């Protein structure tokens, strides 16, 4: 007698339904798993056999054929252990077919019959809801994540025996409760920053509009210190943004049974990272760019990143999504992040330093600056040049403005943007190109200033639109009711880009 239960697999950050069919054949005892299983899925045969025997069930002394449908979709992960074991028990008449058809089953089995959590449980809960199922059965550590989707009945099974008794109708399993958000440790504060008024303003504008930022300056001038304090001034996640971040981190296995992501992500990969590590590789899992969705991707020593790792960001910076086409399939991953990069002005780092001479030959400086291509720089809205802070300023006891005051202005500006765009777009930086002029509502004088600057610098239309977005953010940061973009806002947006200085460098 054949049986059929429902399992699931991850493709990017989405859950896909997999029908697990089991049949017994009068052949020598063995287990055959078909339907493009990966190595981890093939190995489930041994785990399932040991888990069933340890749980007091008899393993069939026949040839067990397990089919994973659709057959043309590659199946990966260890979450098929539970549905395969349930399929074998259902084929042997040990479970209730009606109850099995109502629940999605996902979980890894130990040799002793315990259930271990798997990544992506939030996506599986959303899948069960979309399929109209009653709920799903998950191990502890994964069920709490899935319970964030309130529309489905999430049951917690600690062992194969408990799951079998529930699916057989002889016992009830506890319903999972959503895990509490992680305890937030107080962030680093902007009041610790001495000097650097230009960089502080650029950080505030970047946070208020979600704009990309490049900080350039000698070692020790505070680039990394400033970047580390960006989370302290970022606006609070909306419920929709929090759920989207949680889904991505769940698919990457980074939640560890935690609850809803409550803080905007801040990802800071090392400059040795590969392009696949940034945007996702052959396994179609989220890379650092997707993990930074609705948050910040900080790239320190930006020119030291491999060329392909830098250039692969051009698409996400423009489209705010990543399209991966690999042998395992094609997926689209969310990647709406704020890029914050830091760079030295030259290989030795002392170009422009007031006391340390630069020892780099001109050819080395040119090669170093050429690592940041024009198309990549076009996608960076704000560029600030930092200088070392003098000892008199550094040792001054006077406290600078703290993060709470800056964050209040950022929250107000983001609130104006959400009200203007109706929630579909949450920041000026994410505004589609065709809506920039309409949303900015620039005055005639503002358009004249922008046109003159673009003609003088020979800027592309992309840069012009980005300057207008920055000017819109500056207008949103003004006190009083938000008004149109004026010429003063455009002048400030141009000053925050520092085109002349960069070209001269």
Image: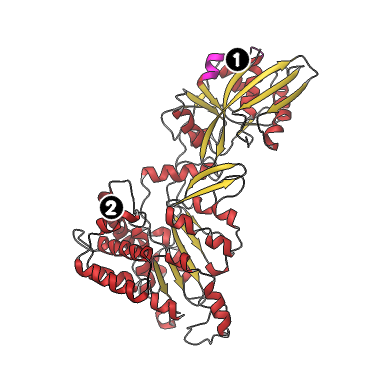
- Kindly identify the residue that appears in the image at 71 percent across and 30 percent down: 47
Is residue 469 part of the magenta span, yes or no? no
- Kindly identify the residue that appears in the image at 79 percent across and 17 percent down: 27
Instruction: In the rendered view, tell whether residue 125 sits above or below residue 311.
Output: above
Please tell me how crowded label 2 is: few (under 14), some (14-19), or many (20+) other residues with Cα within 10 Å. Answer: some
x, y percentage for residue 451? 28, 70
Which residues make up the magenta segment? 92-101
x, y percentage for residue 410? 32, 59
Q: Considering only order in the chain, which callout, 1 or 2, is on the residue closer to the N terminus?
A: 1
| Residue, disc 1 | 95
Apparent side of residue 177 relative to residue 328 in the rendered image (left or right): left
Q: Which mark is residue 273?
A: none
Q: Secondary structure at mark 1?
A: loop
- Kindly identify the residue that appears in the image at 41 percent across and 69 percent down: 192
Q: Which mark is residue 415?
A: 2
x, y percentage for residue 202? 37, 68
In the figure, residue 140 lies in which quadrant?
A: top right
């Amino acid at each position: 007698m054949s049986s059929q239960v429902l399992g699931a697999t991850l493709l990017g950050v989405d859950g896909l339904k997999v029908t697990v069919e089991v049949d017994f054949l009068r052949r020598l005892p063995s287990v055959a798993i078909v339907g493009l299983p990966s190595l981890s899925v093939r190995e489930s045969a041994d785990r399932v056999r040991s888990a069933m025997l340890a749980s007091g069930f008899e393993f069939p002394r026949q040839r067990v054929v397990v089919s994973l449908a659709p057959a043309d979709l590659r199946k990966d992960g260890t979450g098929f252990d539970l549905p395969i074991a349930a399929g074998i028990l259902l084929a042997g008449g040990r479970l209730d077919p009606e109850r099995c058809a109502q629940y999605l089953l996902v979980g890894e089995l130990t040799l002793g019959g315990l259930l271990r959590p798997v990544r992506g449980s939030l996506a599986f809960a959303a899948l069960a809801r979309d399929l109209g199922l009653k709920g799903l059965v998950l191990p502890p550590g994964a069920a709490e994540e899935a319970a964030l989707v309130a529309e489905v009945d999430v049951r917690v099974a600690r062992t194969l025996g408990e799951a079998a008794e529930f699916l057989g109708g002889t016992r009830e399993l506890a319903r999972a409760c959503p895990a509490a958000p992680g305890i937030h440790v107080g962030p680093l504060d902007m009041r610790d920053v001495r000097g650097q008024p230009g960089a502080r303003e650029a950080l505030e504008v970047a946070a208020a509009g979600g704009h990309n930022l490049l900080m350039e300056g000698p070692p020790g001038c505070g680039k990394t210190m400033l970047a580390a304090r960006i989370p302290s001034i970022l606006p609070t996640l909306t419920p929709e943004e929090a759920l989207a971040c949680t889904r991505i981190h769940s698919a990457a296995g980074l939640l560890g049974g935690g609850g809803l992501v409550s803080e905007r992500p801040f990802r800071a990969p090392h400059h040795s990272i590969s392009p696949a590590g940034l945007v996702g590789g052959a396994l179609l899992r989220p890379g650092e760019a997707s993990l930074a969705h609705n948050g910040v991707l900080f790239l320190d020593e930006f020119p030291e990143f491999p060329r392909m790792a830098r250039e692969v960001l051009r698409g996400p910076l423009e489209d705010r999504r990543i399209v991966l086409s690999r042998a395992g399939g094609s997926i689209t991953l969310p990647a709406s992040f704020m890029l914050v990069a830091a760079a030295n002005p030259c290989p030795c780092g002392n170009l422009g330093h007031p006391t340390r001479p630069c020892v780099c030959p001109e050819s080395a400086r040119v090669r170093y600056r050429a690592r940041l291509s024009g198309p990549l720089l076009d996608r960076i809205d704000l560029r600030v040049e930092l200088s070392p802070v003098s000892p008199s300023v550094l040792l001054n006891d006077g406290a600078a403005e703290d993060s709470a005051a800056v964050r209040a202005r950022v929250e107000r500006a983001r609130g104006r943007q959400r009200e203007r765009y109706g929630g579909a777009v949450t920041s000026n930086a994410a505004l589609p190109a065709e809506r920039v002029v309409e949303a900015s509502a620039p005055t005639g004088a503002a358009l004249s200033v922008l046109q003159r600057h673009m003609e003088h610098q020979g800027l592309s239309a992309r840069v012009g639109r980005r300057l207008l977005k920055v000017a819109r953010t500056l207008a949103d940061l003004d006190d009083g009711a938000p008004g149109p973009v004026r010429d003063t806002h455009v002048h400030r947006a141009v000053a925050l880009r520092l085109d002349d200085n960069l070209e001269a460098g």
